[in-house]
């Protein structure tokens, strides 16, 4: 390593064979490749913060984001650059953290998997322009020649995705925040440690966290990794998400819901249930969403209760085109009585979410109809084709098949109504809506910001 050949290109750009300090083992992992550096070769220490996938509920990963913050604060902006390989598990979090903490990034862009001609690749990257607001990425070429798929000398890690191989191979120093036992990241880290061609003590693994089990940490440290222990209190996030104050025999809310349901035999309401949201809110940018997570702001909570709180605070339900044929922005309601919501609650694997959570708002049917709400038209593709354009936003295919079980789903049991566009709740009279939640403690949170009654849905076992 250290003897890479560099040729200047137009302006500041340069092209090199590999990167500074590229080891022979890295060459075996990746094959012979060129790197185009849009602003010249970067010689500073490349630091990669790596992780297995975090899952959907990012707000429950406070410990992970806290450690990411601490890692960024300990880097030296003068001598360190954060190595980011596009589409790796932690890439977007690390890149945003670098912006927040004033650190430089070295982004690696990978060749298209179908792009095997390095000369055509070179012409393409020579014409590429950087995205506004981002420093241009270093471009990794396809292999310069075929090293032979039958070559028995290829290491086992050569079968792993290129992005993960590049990140582990190209870093001068690695910090692993989350390593799934037996996963690709553990195998890549182990292979790097076992090769002895990278500097000793250049792989660090976070200790004292559920993201890296003791078995994984011990295995990696036995191979030469260095434990990184962050002193401080690790608390159970579930303590915050469920405070144990769910009422069992509280006459107040239980009576309120029973009286409400008993007094509405014909059920003159239409109900909009909220659900947790993965990713930014409809009116929130990606950067704002990431900042909430990275800076541990209260707004990082995207639970069904948080969604309902936003609706009440903003006095509107924001329309969405998700799951709507034709891409129309709609707000969905159910005509099912509120007491029957529990029977409709189901996990939808294809959407990775629960439907009909016990959080939401019920609006009087007459009011919603007066502002354009109407029941959906259930049917098949022939019904959709026959509908006039102004009715197509209200179409719902009646039958579909479950992705996992192949069982038939009849969507008409949802008794769906829709409203085109956002619903302006500031126009709803004080006596034309009711808000519902799962626990009395949650109801107490919402009553100060709700113009309408807030009731507690009691489960059968309470």
Image (cartoon, helix red, strand yellow):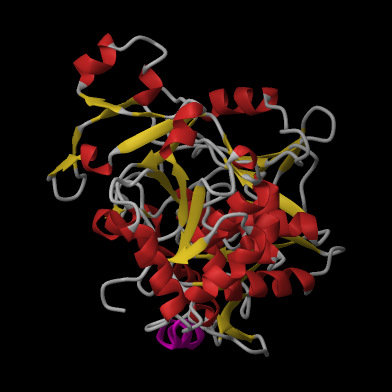
Residue at 21 percent across and 45 percent down: it is: 403
Q: Main secondary structure of the magenta part?
A: helix
* Residue 378 versus residue 78 in the image, above or below: above
Q: Is residue 394 left or right of residue 401?
A: right
Residue at 78 percent across and 54 percent down: it is: 99
* Residue 86 versus residue 205 in the image, above or below: above
Percent x, y for residue 260? 39, 60
Farthest residue to the front: give it. 263
Pick whichever, 279 or 97, lies toward us.
Answer: 279
* Residue 158 versus residue 364 in the image, above or below: below
Q: Is residue 27 visible?
A: no
Q: Is residue 375 left or right of residue 74?
A: left
Which of the 4 image quarters holds residue 203?
bottom right
Pick whichever, 327 or 260, lies toward us.
Answer: 260
Query: Quick one: quadrant of the N terminus?
Result: bottom right
Farthest residue to the right: give it. 78
Which of the 4 image quarters holds residue 94?
bottom right
Residue at 66 percent across and 45 percent down: it is: 284
* Residue 20 versus residue 79 in the image, above or below: above
Percent x, y for residue 96? 70, 54
Percent x, y for residue 100? 79, 58
Residue 426 in magenta stretch: no
Percent x, y for residue 265? 28, 51
**Range shown magenta:** 213-223
Residue 216 in magenta stretch: yes
Q: Is residue 151 visible?
A: yes
């Amino acid at each position: 390593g250290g003897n890479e050949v560099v040729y200047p290109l137009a302006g500041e750009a340069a092209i090199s064979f590999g990167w500074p300090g590229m080891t022979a083992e890295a060459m075996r992992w990746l094959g012979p490749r060129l790197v185009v550096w849009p602003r010249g070769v970067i010689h500073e220490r490349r630091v990669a913060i790596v992780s297995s996938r975090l899952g959907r509920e990012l707000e429950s990963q406070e410990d992970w984001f806290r450690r990411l913050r601490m890692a960024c604060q300990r880097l030296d902006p003068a001598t360190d650059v954060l190595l980011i390989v596009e589409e790796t598990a932690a890439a977007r979090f690390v890149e945003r953290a670098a912006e927040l903490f004033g650190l430089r990034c070295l982004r690696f862009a990978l060749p298209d998997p179908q792009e095997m001609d390095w000369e055509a690749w070179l012409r393409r990257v020579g014409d590429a322009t950087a995205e506004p607001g981002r420093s241009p990425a270093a471009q990794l070429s396809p292999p310069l020649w075929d090293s032979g798929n039958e070559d028995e000398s290829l290491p086992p890690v050569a079968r792993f995705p290129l992005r993960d191989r590049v990140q582990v191979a190209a870093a001068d120093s690695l910090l692993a925040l989350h390593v799934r036992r037996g996963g690709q990241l553990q195998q890549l880290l182990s292979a790097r440690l076992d090769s002895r061609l990278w500097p000793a003590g250049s792989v660090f693994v976070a200790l004292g966290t559920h993201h890296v089990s003791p078995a994984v940490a011990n295995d990696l440290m036995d191979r030469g990794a260095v434990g990184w222990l962050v002193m401080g209190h690790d608390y159970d996030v579930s303590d915050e998400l469920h405070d144990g104050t769910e009422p069992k025999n509280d006459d107040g809310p239980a009576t309120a819901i029973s009286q409400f349901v008993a007094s509405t035999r014909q059920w003159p309401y239409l109900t909009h249930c909220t659900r947790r949201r993965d990713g930014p809110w409809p009116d929130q940018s990606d950067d704002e969403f990431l900042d909430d997570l990275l800076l541990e702001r209260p707004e990082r909570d995207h639970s069904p209760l948080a969604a309902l709180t936003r609706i009440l605070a903003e006095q509107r339900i924001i329309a969405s085109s998700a799951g709507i044929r034709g891409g129309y922005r709609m707000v969905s309601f159910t005509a099912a009585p509120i007491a029957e919501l529990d029977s409709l609650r189901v996990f939808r694997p294809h959407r990775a979410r629960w439907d009909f959570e016990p959080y939401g708002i019920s609006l009087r049917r007459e009011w919603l109809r007066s502002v354009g709400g109407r029941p959906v038209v259930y049917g098949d593709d022939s019904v959709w084709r026959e509908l006039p354009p102004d009715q197509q936003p209200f179409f719902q295919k009646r039958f579909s098949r479950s992705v996992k079980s192949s069982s038939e789903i009849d969507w008409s049991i949802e008794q769906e109504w829709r409203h085109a566009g956002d619903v302006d709740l500031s126009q709803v009279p004080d006596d034309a809506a009711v808000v519902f939640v799962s626990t009395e403690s949650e109801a107490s949170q919402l009553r100060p910001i709700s113009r309408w009654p807030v009731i507690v849905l009691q489960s059968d076992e309470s």
